[in-house]
Amino acid sequence: MVLIGDHTDYVGGLVLPMAIDLHTEVTGTPGGRSVSLRSEQFDEPVAFDLPVDDPAAVRPEWGRYVAGVAAEFDPAVGLVGSVRSTVPPGGGLSSSAALELAVALALGSEDDPLTLARRCQRAERVATGVPCGIMDQLCSASGVAGHALLIDCATEEATPVPVPEDLAVWVVESGEPRRLADSAYATRRAEAEAAAELLGPLRDATPAAIESLESAVLRRRARHVRSECDRVRWLAGALADGDLTTAGELVVDSHRSLRDDAEVSTGTLDLLVDSLLARSDVLGARLTGAGFGGTVVALCRPDADLTGAGAGGRRVRAADGARQV
């Protein structure tokens, strides 16, 4: 789950996500030359033979992520089992990355967290065609309990940042599902990359250079990346210092940038953010994930209760990353 830093990872920017105490677990019996899994979240199971030639052709749709992982890791034997998850699909809480890592570990991966994240990122790209960055997979693989992760997506270095004990983090569902394959995610990435081709690394671009771009669209995309990377640095510092007021203000500014410059918010998300900000127990709120629907993250006072907000809220805590058990 991203505290701040959406739509910066795919151009080598800075992000500040945290692994949360929602889980995806794959259990089963290894053997044979096929993979067959049932999920509590979906009616239709997935089954396919190994090796996988075309993960994108596997059905049902959720099975493409499983097939992408199987194609990337090419296990010696298959698996028959089940998937249990408390991560809501399509909510912007990295449900696909959680599934990918759980499947990879169940198929026997012994990779270090960074290698595991890279391979699961490749698996998702092959399976869905979505040109995702590495943030979700790396956060899910490298999470540290009680900490967010400051990730430099240019170097793929992750630095733990403590989350203050007197800060309550809530995720609130908007009720508006999103699917990246059907959204303008790839378009937003292409626009940011086009701006980077003209300016160099957007995290280092000067405001004057950004405003010199002829295209108003590219100016907005570059402005978002540059300003969001600054906010990531500042939020990491505010959390380390326990400055919760500044942390909340930075989160609000992030949402405005995602709405106005990245243009990935929706009317539903904006209304939900506004309603949360009207509460005295909410310090800041923003969409989290790629946008186009999904979930809002709110930084709150310890006594906040957002259970009834939006389509339902839940307090989350920073947790360790993916593990074999």
Image (cartoon, rainbow, N blue to C red):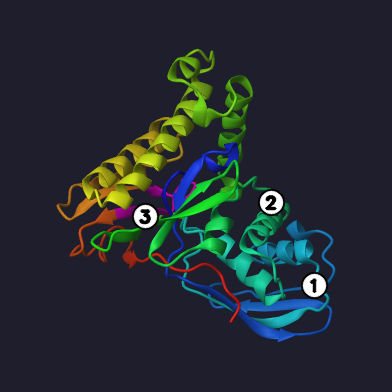
Residue 80, image x, y percentages = 71, 83
Q: Give the amino acid at mark 3.
A: Ser
72 magenta-colored: no
Q: Earlier in the sequence, mark 1 or mark 3?
A: 1
- Label 1 close to label 3 by CB (< 8 Å): no
Q: Earlier in the sequence, mark 2 or mark 1?
A: 1
288 magenta-colored: yes
Which label lies toward us, 1 or 3? Answer: 1
Q: Give the amino acid at mark 2.
A: Arg
Magenta-tinted stretch? 287-298
The answer to whether residue 132 is above or below residue 216 is below
Q: Where's the C terminus, which quadrant? A: bottom right
Secondary element at tag 1? loop
Q: Residues within 10 Å of mark 1 (few under 14, many from 20)?
A: some
On screen, residue 110 versus residue 138, left or right, reads right
Q: Give the amino acid at mark 1.
A: Pro
The answer to whether residue 124 is above or below residue 232 is below
Secondary element at tag 3? loop
Residue 55, image x, y percentages = 76, 60
Residue 309, image x, y percentages = 26, 60
Report which residue position mark 2 lands on: 125
The answer to whether residue 51 is above or below residue 295 is below
- Label 2 close to label 3 by CB (< 8 Å): no
Q: Residue sitting at 22 percent across and 65 percent down?
A: 305
Report which residue position mark 1 lands on: 75
Separation of residues labelled 1 and 3 (CA atoms): 38 Å
Q: Earlier in the sequence, mark 2 or mark 3?
A: 2
Front residue of 221/325: it is: 325
Secondary element at tag 2? helix
Front residue of 12/212: it is: 12
